[in-house]
């Protein structure tokens, strides 16, 4: 039963999952260890694979596991079947993760009718506005600071939409992004975009870093020209990853339930019969050129402090990193070839 929000309206209830990697059915096995008013793990009883009653189901990405595109398509079918069972949840959103297929298909989930978000988009659901940011290889290793000089990047920063909720696969850098190796592996790009935004989201939902699961209030702010840090309203960041630490082979946590206050103004101007798909708008965030997308040196403005020894793997889209070749190995091979050529001469 929902409690009324501060403005007297029933809040929007969201069920949030992430990084299920093909094990969605196991979500029904997790009882509630404890609850709070804002965020809690639901109690799900039985083997019917049903999630709790909600207005919207949000998957923050990585429903697929490592492997070939065939395995990815099989994972998509499994998730579609799982989501199709959740008939009591009218809206279902799946944001693309780094393991998920980059499918050109218009509908990846035909049975459940879930929206598969592959590009930066916005939607509105019952008076709550969402900005959706799928995983992008163009921004995974890029800092906004590298591209601030270009007008297109500056325009992208200033055009970040006003929203109540930001949904992304990656967490912001430095917030719920610590890996078991001790590295912060969140997105510097998304963090800087939010810091530069005129209005910050009230809530940021994410996943990606399994061991970073948790909840944190954080002030995303930039320094003024005089060096004084502006005080901003805090954003609640939730990393809802369900999988175990490291390479996923099981789920160790249940879904997260969030009650979100609705805006009376947004409700008044919105179409009561409009679905999330009807309000879906794709927006342009970054330019399409590929220059300096993956800078490999440590002084490229990425801010990857303490990660000098971390190897960057070069991969094909949709294929797990182990299919690629570590950059250090590539350098060694090139050096050995050069040495051989000199000796032969």
Image (cartoon, rainbow, N blue to C red):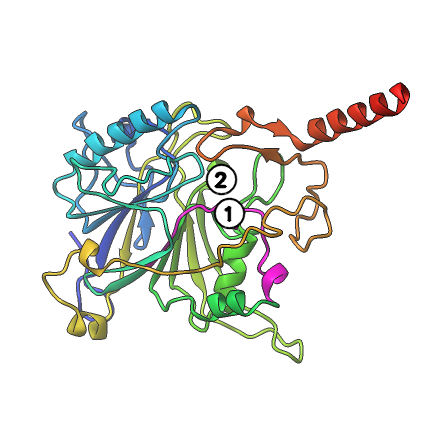
Q: Which residue is mark 2?
A: 209
Q: Looking at the image, which residue sits at the far left?
A: 273
Q: Which residue is mark 1?
A: 176
For the residue labelled by badge 1, is the local secondary structure a helix, a strand or a loop? loop
Q: First in sequence: mark 2 or mark 1?
A: 1
Q: Residue at 48% across / 58% down in the picture?
A: 286
Front position among marks 2 and 1: 2
Is residue 248 shown left or right of residue 112?
A: right
Work out whether residue 219 can be spotted: no
User: To which quarter of the image does residue 184 belong?
Assistant: top right
Q: Residue at 54% across / 29% down in the picture?
A: 321
Write down the region rendered in magenta.
131-148
Task: Bin the neighbour count of mark 1 within 10 Å (Cα to Cα): few under 14, some 14-19, many 20 and up.
Answer: many
Indicate the position of residue 132 as horizontal and vertical percent values: 35, 54
Q: Residue at 22% across / 58% down in the picture?
A: 12
Q: Main secondary structure of the magenta part?
A: loop
Indicate the position of residue 85 as horizontal and vertical percent values: 15, 34
Work out whether residue 99 can be spotted: yes
The residue closer to the viewer here, 165 or 2, is 165
User: To which quarter of the image does residue 148 belong?
Assistant: bottom right
Indicate the position of residue 68 as horizontal and vertical percent values: 41, 24
Is residue 194 shown left or right of residue 184?
A: left
């Amino acid at each position: 039963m929902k409690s009324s929000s501060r403005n007297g309206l029933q809040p929007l209830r969201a069920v949030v999952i992430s990084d299920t990697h093909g094990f969605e059915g196991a979500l029904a096995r997790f009882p509630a260890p404890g609850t709070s008013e804002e965020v809690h793990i639901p109690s799900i009883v039985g083997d019917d694979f049903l999630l709790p009653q909600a207005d919207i189901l949000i998957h923050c990405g990585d429903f697929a596991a490592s492997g070939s595109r065939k395995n990815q398509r099989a994972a998509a079918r499994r998730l579609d079947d799982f989501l199709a069972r959740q008939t009591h949840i009218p809206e279902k959103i799946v944001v693309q993760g780094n393991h998920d297929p980059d499918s050109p298909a218009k509908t990846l989930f035909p049975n459940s009718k879930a929206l598969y978000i592959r590009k930066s988009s916005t939607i509105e659901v019952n008076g709550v506005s969402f900005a959706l940011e799928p995983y992008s290889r163009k921004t995974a290793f890029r800092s906004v600071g590298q591209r601030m000089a270009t007008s297109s990047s500056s325009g992208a920063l200033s055009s970040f939409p006003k929203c109540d909720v930001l949904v992304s696969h990656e967490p912001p850098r430095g917030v719920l992004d610590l890996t078991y190796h001790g590295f912060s592996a969140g997105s510097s790009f998304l963090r800087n975009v939010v810091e530069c935004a005129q209005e910050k989201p009230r809530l940021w939902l994410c996943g990606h870093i399994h061991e970073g699961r948790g909840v944190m209030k954080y002030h995303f702010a930039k320094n003024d020209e005089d060096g004084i840090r502006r005080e901003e309203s805090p954003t609640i960041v939730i990393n809802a990853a369900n999988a175990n630490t490291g390479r996923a082979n099981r789920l160790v946590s249940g879904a997260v339930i969030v009650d979100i206050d609705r805006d009376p103004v947004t409700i008044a101007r919105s179409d009561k019969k409009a679905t999330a798909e009807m309000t879906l708008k794709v927006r342009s965030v970054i330019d399409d050129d590929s220059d300096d997308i993956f800078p490999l040196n440590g002084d490229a403005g990425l801010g990857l402090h303490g990660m000098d020894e971390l190897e960057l793997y070069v991969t094909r889209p949709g294929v797990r990193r182990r299919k690629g070749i570590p950059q250090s190995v590539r350098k060694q091979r090139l050096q050995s070839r050069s040495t051989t050529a000199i000796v032969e001469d």
